[in-house]
Every structure is written in structure tokens, then in C-alpha cells.
Image (spheres, grey):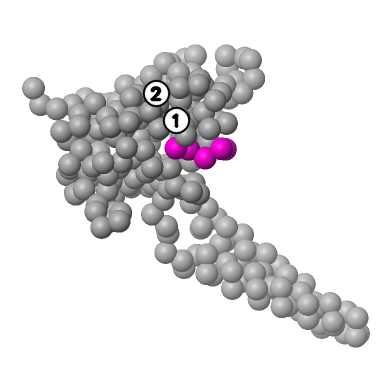
Amino acid sequence: MDSDRALSCPQPWRAPDGTVHSSGVPDGKVATVEEEGGGGLLLPSRQARVAAGVVLVILGLVFGGLAAFLIVRGGMPTSLGGGVLGVLALLLLAAGVFALRRKPRTTGILLTPDHVVINWVHPAVRLAWDDITEIRPLGLRIGRANTGLSHNYVGVVSRQSDAANVRMRKVAARFGKDVTCALPMRSLDVDQLVVLHTLTFYLDNPDSRAELAGPDAVRRVREVRFRLPE
């Protein structure tokens, strides 16, 4: 990101030294995806697909090695146990390969010209732009020390107060009764400041929301253009 395009960081997300509280190292990319016949801008969420697949494959290999050892050792009970471990190893290997080869789901925060859709939760939360009144940066500190761990959230204040599920409403209640849902930035695979400024830009500029259906929104986010020309 160019220095002249550096995004401002809100106070709730700052550490005592002025730096941004970390939310991990994102490596996802924004993209245009199809949503119910129309396009939308996807701010992708993190997916544990690769890590889970690798773990399953490693466990399968370990169990396979143990199975081979028991079978070679001989004896009816030992061989029977080795056979059971062998079957389990094959199942783990198959599950791991499937997880690694499966096409990633397009989950995250989906921005369409009419709605904001949070679809990494079930059921998905769908909020109309016209009902959203504020995008609010929020911080949740763990412990009382100023230097303690802090998690960053984006709070969505909406007139659709019951749109989120029970679990999301419980998290949002920590920040205020008017917060409809609080989105943890550590769950997203995009820079947290980009997420905040993208949501704020399209909330404040309704005439620009039509571009969310096509590639113009992707270019805007990648080029960090969150100010309209004067």
C-alpha cells in the first residue's frame, strides 16, 4: 500500500504505542462473486481447509505406520488391531485429500448494491444498506492492562435489530444495545483497515453501490480509493 494511500486507524483499534492491534496475517483477495443472479464484492473470511487437510493427512500417515508395525509384529489380537488402525488411516487420508482438493467456499462479507450479507455464519445474516445507520470500529480488550491482548471488531448498527442469530447478538451486546452484530476481524482474510474503510465508504456513498455488482468495486478496494473526486 502506498504511503499516500495509507488508511487511518480508529482509536479503538490502536495499541498504546499507536500501532494497529494485529488480527493475523491476511492473504485473501477481494473478488466479484455471483449472488442470487447478481454480482457482489466479497471480502473473504479465513478458511481452515488447508490446515485441516494437512493435519488429517499427517494423522493418516501416523496411523498407517502404526498399523503396519502391528501387522508385521504378528499375532491375532495385534494384527486385528493393526487392521482397524489401517482402516482408520485410510479414512483419515481420504478425508485429508478431499479437504485439500475441495474448492474453497466463497464466504465472508458479501456487499451487493442492496445488501450486506455475512455468510460465513449459519444462517447467513442479510442486512439492507438502507437499514444500516453506522459502521463502528470496536475493540475488546482481554484483561485490564493497557498492554493486554485486544481483538478488533467491526460493529454494524442497523434498524434490523433481530437480523443476527443468537450467538452473534450475544457478542454484539458486549458493545452496546444498538449494535446489531460485531464482526471479528481475525475471522476475515483481508486487511482489517480495508474491511472497515470499504464498509464505511459504501455506507456513506449510496450512489456508488451500483458498482458493487461488477469489477469496479474490486479495483477501488485494491487501489485503496475510498474518497470520491471533488
Residue at point 84%, 82% (across, down): 80
Q: Residues within 10 Å of mark 1 (few under 14, many from 20)?
A: some
Q: Dominant secondary structure of the magenta stretch?
A: loop
Q: Which residue is mark 1?
A: 161
Residue 226 in sight from this viewpoint = no
In the image, residue 45 above or below residue 76 = above
- Under mark 2, the amino acid is Arg
Q: Secondary structure at mark 1?
A: loop
* Alpha carbons under labels 1 and 2: distance apart: 15 Å
Residue 136, label in figure: 2
Residue in front for this viewpoint, 132 or 200? 132
The count of marks equals 2
Q: Quadrant of the N terminus?
A: top left
Measuring from the top left, give residue 119's x and y in whole percent. 42, 48
Measuring from the top left, give residue 218's x and y in whole percent. 23, 44
Query: Magenta span covers which residues?
Result: 163-167
Q: Secondary structure at mark 2?
A: strand
Residue at point 57%, 31% (across, down): 170
Name the side, left or right, on which 82 lies relative to 29. right
Q: Is residue 9 magenta?
A: no
Name the side, left or right, on which 67 lies relative to 127. right
Measuring from the top left, give residue 184's x and y in whole percent. 49, 34
Measuring from the top left, give residue 54's x and y in whole percent. 57, 61
- Under mark 1, the amino acid is Ser
Q: Is residue 164 magenta?
A: yes
